[in-house]
Image: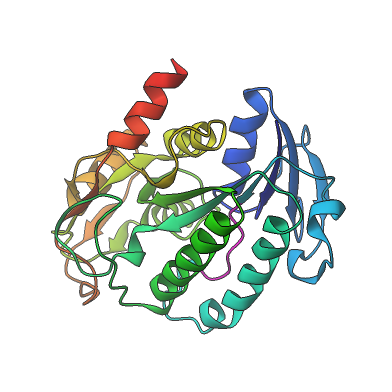
């Protein structure tokens, strides 16, 4: 399959591109720069929002995996709202030009404040500009895909655990702090429970979803179980033998963060089984 990956130079994009290439797919990787992109891919540097006919420009891919997104960790950045029509226009052009399958990276932040297991039928009530924009994009593109007989996949991501410094997650920030020689890391109380997935496994799940077209719609990229934030971060520090301790209570929890939230893994489990 020929798969176009947008945002290929991003924290997640680089890992997913590698997974797709390792599985033998033809990958066209695009972003505004290519510093982190696996050089086995065909790399096209450019701004996807300023291409008149992206389907032709990117050599008529079978699938587009749309991972491009600005300010993902700045939840109330106005760029989420300002960029939304651009994402819609780009994907709409692909839909009306002949693309067979569209997969988009989503987020559990679309759900808003919720406690318990999330599945594809869980109602969304996003509490941040990031969540609002992602949810709006999902609803718009889902309708367009249905009206044009294009396979639609919304890959709803949960929390990623990675030990590299090129990211904005709590785990990347701990890596950055350790490299700076910090001995203490300011932290919340860490009582909230989330669904954590190691970076490589996260990227593998995304790739497996895109490589098949039998299980579609909203698919949770998740572990399927909750774990207390403090426990996972303490374990992360131990796993990496970091000489740093958490300074609890330095920051308050964000008011829109759920106390315990995790993904229903039934769809992704079936996809993995089918692959095996």
Residue at image position (49%, 39%) is 206
Residue 230 in the figure: left or right of residue 144: left
Tell me if I can see residue 259 in this picture: yes
* Quadrant housing residue 76: bottom left
**Magenta-highlighted residues:** 66-71
In depth, the one of 267 and 147 nearer the eye is 147
Image quarter of the C terminus: top left
* Tally of numbered discs: 0
Nearer the observer, 36 or 178: 36
The stretch drawn in magenta includes residue 65? no
Q: Residue at x 86, y 54 (%)?
A: 57
Q: Is residue 9 above or below residue 46?
A: above
- In percent of width and height, residue 43 lies at 81, 45
Tell whether 176 sits left or right of 150. left
Q: Position of residue 257 (x, y in %)?
A: 23, 68
Relative placement, left or right, of 155 versus 223 is right
Q: Position of residue 199 (x, y in %)?
A: 45, 40
In the rendered image, is residue 194 in sight?
Answer: no
Q: Residue furthest top?
A: 276
* Residue 17 percent across, percent down from the top left: 64, 38
Q: Is residue 265 above or below residue 130?
A: above
Residue found at x 36% / y 77%: 128
Q: Residue at x 51, y 68 (%)?
A: 140
Give the colouring mode of the picture.
rainbow
Query: Which quarter shows the N terminus?
Result: top right
What's the magenta bit mostly, secondary-structure-wise? Answer: loop
From the viewer's perspective, is residue 234 above or below residue 131?
A: above
């Amino acid at each position: 399959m020929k798969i176009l990956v947008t945002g290929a130079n991003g924290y997640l994009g680089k890992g997913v591109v590698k997974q797709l290439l390792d599985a033998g797919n033809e990958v066209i990787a695009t972003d505004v720069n290519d510093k982190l992109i696996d050089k086995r891919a065909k790399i096209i540097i450019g701004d996807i929002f300023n291409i008149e006919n992206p389907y032709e420009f990117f050599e008529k891919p079978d699938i587009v995996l749309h991972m491009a997104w600005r300010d993902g960790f700045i939840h109330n950045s106005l760029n989420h709202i300002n960029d939304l029509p651009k994402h819609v226009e780009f994907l709409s052009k692909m839909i009306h030009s002949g693309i067979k399958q569209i997969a988009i990276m989503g987020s559990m932040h679309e759900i808003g404040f919720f406690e318990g297991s999330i599945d594809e039928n869980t109602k969304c009530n996003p509490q941040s500009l990031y969540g609002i924009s992602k949810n709006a994009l999902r609803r718009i593109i889902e309708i367009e895909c249905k009206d044009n007989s294009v396979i639609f996949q919304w890959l709803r991501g949960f929390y990623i655990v990675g030990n590299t410094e090129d990211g904005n997650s709590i785990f990347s920030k701990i890596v950055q702090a350790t490299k700076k020689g910090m001995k203490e890391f300011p932290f919340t109380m860490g009582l909230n429970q989330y669904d954590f997935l190691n970076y490589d496994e996260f990227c593998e799940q995304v790739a497996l979803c895109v490589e098949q077209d039998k299980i579609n719609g909203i698919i949770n990229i998740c572990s399927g179980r909750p774990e207390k934030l403090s426990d996972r971060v303490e374990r992360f520090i131990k796993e990496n033998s970091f000489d740093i301790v958490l300074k609890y209570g330095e920051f308050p929890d964000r008011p829109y963060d759920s106390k315990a939230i995790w993904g229903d893994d039934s769809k992704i489990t079936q996809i993995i089984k089918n692959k095996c």
